[in-house]
Amino acid sequence: MVASILISISAVVSAVLVGFVARRIIGTAVGWPRSIVVGLLVFVLGVPSAAWTLRQTGLAESGGAIPAEDAWLWIGLVALSLAWVFALGVAALVASEAIFPTRPLPNPIDVVRAALRQRKRTRRYLEILAIASRHGVGWLFHGGRSRVEEQLSTSEERANAIVATINDAGVSFVKLGQVLSTRRDLVPEPYLSALASLQTNATTLPWPTVRQVIEDDLGRPIGDVFADVDPTPLAAASVAQVHRAHLLDGTRVVVKVQRPAARAQVEADADIIDRLAHRAEARTRVGRDLRLEAVARGFTATLLEELDYRIEARNTAMIGATLDEIDRAEPVRRGMVSAPRVFPNASHQRVLTMELVDGTALSDSAERLSSLDVSQRDRLAQVLMSTVIEQILVYGVFHADLHPGNVLLRHDGTLGLIDFGAVGIIERSRRQHLTALLLAALSENDVAAADALLLIVDVPDDLDLDAFRHDVGVVLTTEHLRTTGHGSIFTRMVDVIRQHRIALPGELASAFRSFATLEGCLRVLVDDFDMAGRALPLMPMLLRRTLSLSRMATDLQAQSVIALARLEQIPRRLDALLTGAEKGSIGITLRGQDGSDISGILARATGEIASTLVSIAAVVIAVVLVIAGGGPVLGGSITLFAALGAVVGLFGFLGLLRIVRRGFTRRS
């Protein structure tokens, strides 16, 4: 009984020691199950290994007693043998950990939830793949080609097949396709035109469902907020629908209500979109050219953000603030372009209440526009152009989706902007570069335009600067001489950027898109409106507002304060430097690109090199000592040098284990 207890205790101690030593050597956690298994193997093999070692050295004779003078030698040899078995067990544990790292056991509830999500995602994933294959777009996701795919011989046919796939894939994919249709810097023709044809076939929600969403989101009965709400929707889209209503004070408003399942559906499809984009980019040239993975990741984040109507409310307020500033600067055009007021007390995450903008979209106003005289239409176009350009260049806040459907011709003959789910924001330093680019482009200065453009984009290392400047010059020359058609100098500039594989920052892509869509709106108002010629005279005025004397004086004051603060620190730093030089304690701190202190890297690298050399040297010395033998005979066939070699080799072996494990960790 006592022997069994002692054996059990020894086995437990062995398992604990193996795990503890492995943790110390590896420097990371090791799973206890494998530690226990290896520890028990060490315990089981330890005694037979010690007995075998004693027999090989001639110290253990069958049935012989241990001489008193050899007792300590026996103990040392048994301990050394057990230590080597222990070290080999640790090596096995380190190897298993390097190949199959320990992972924490998940919560059973989380496992079940993850399995359910995985099942739902897999079903949806297979559904989308089936839709893609049916329309012949399976080449985006796998290497093979089906009979249907072989029939798509032209880019136009492939683009139409992609659009058909997106239409059948559901709301999230249609919304993503619509956003992609505005990114001319990423999507070439004919895919761009095909994506622009995407339409959402949205069914209207029943009024009880809409009412429940409003009351749940606002946290109050609908009668506490609105005097009445028209149950028949004014418009319905894939994510939301809009109803006319009156507030308690009689103000006419529109209420934008998000569909109950919209967020869940977008969130469920976001991961699938990212996975499909990853596969498409990895396996197809089209995916690589369009950089689908980065595009999908950015746009799914944007789609999720647009589902929070509090963000759209802030965007609307910012646009309204810029319009107020512009009206104060030029009272003569006050009220010519307006944005609706938002009512925060009647808005929240899924409900947005705004002032009713009475009027019709420019895209549907051909009859009303034809009734206006030429001067009225030209006045509207001129004011809209100057307003948008000033928002972009002076204030840095602008409508990022300004197509003719989002500009309303109001009943009083003014223009109203709506739908601020996407708003561009450009910081002041980039606005200055963009102003220089626009001024150079409008004046046909191709050298200055190319140089200004290079200041605001991420220039690749292999960019052919001469070819890039040439292409920019060709665009400026041809567009300034264009007398017919509806081309845009900005869309062609974006084409040049894409052709040279230059990454255009998202906010600048939004600005270019707004310039291009602005031209579309202006030509709805005035068919032959020359935006380049009419915008150039505005630039001196915009430059004066951007670089006003008061702003320059403020900038100079801020820079002076910063420079003075730095000058005040120079004597103290110089004194510290001289003191350090006098004491011989000058140090150098290395920092990475993120500003983190990396000065310890050199010390760690030196320490690792030193430990590696010491471990290798220990193993080499051990091998030499064991093979050479020599020295006093300790007993049997054991010599002093052989025993020292075994001990030194043990420590060298453990040191090499630590180095190997670090290599595995660093590579992972």
Image (cartoon, rainbow, N blue to C red):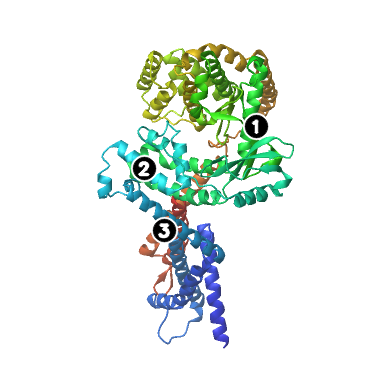
The quadrant of the image that shows the N terminus is bottom right
Q: Amino acid at mark 2?
A: Ile
* Badge 1 amino acid: Ala
Three-letter amino acid code at the position of disc 3: Val
Q: Position of residue 523 (x, y in %)?
A: 46, 21
Q: Is residue 559 visible?
A: no
The label number, if any, that marks residue 156 in the structure image: none
The residue lying toward the viewer, choosing from 173 and 73, is: 173
Local secondary structure at mark 1:
helix
Q: Residues within 10 Å of mark 2 (few under 14, many from 20)?
A: many
Q: Are marks 1 and 2 in contact (CB under 8 Å)?
A: no
The residue carrying pointer 3 sits among few (fewer than 14), some (14 to 19) or many (20 or more) residues within 10 Å by Cα, namely many
Q: Which residue is mark 2?
A: 162
Judging by the rendered image, the residue that carries numbered circle 1 is 317
Query: Across the whole image, how many numbered discs are drawn on residues?
Result: 3
Dividing the picture into quadrants, the one containing residue 470 is top left
Residue 63 % position (x, y):
42, 87
Q: Is residue 578 left or right of residue 83?
A: right
Q: Secondary structure at mark 3?
A: helix
Determine the CA span between mark 3 and mark 2: 63 Å
Q: CA distance from mark 1 to mark 3?
A: 73 Å
Residue 521 location in percent, x, y?
Answer: 49, 24
Q: Against 507, is 161 above or below?
A: below
As drawn, the label of residue 619 is: 3
The tag earlier along the polypeptide, 1 or 3, is: 1
Using the image, determine if residue 274 lies above or below residue 509. Answer: below
Q: Secondary structure at mark 2?
A: helix
- Dots 1 and 3: beta carbons under 8 Å? no
Residue at 55%, 75% (x, y): give it: 12
Q: Residues within 10 Å of mark 1 (few under 14, many from 20)?
A: some
Q: Where residue 117 sits in the image (x, y, percent)?
A: 50, 59
The CA span between labels 1 and 2 is 37 Å
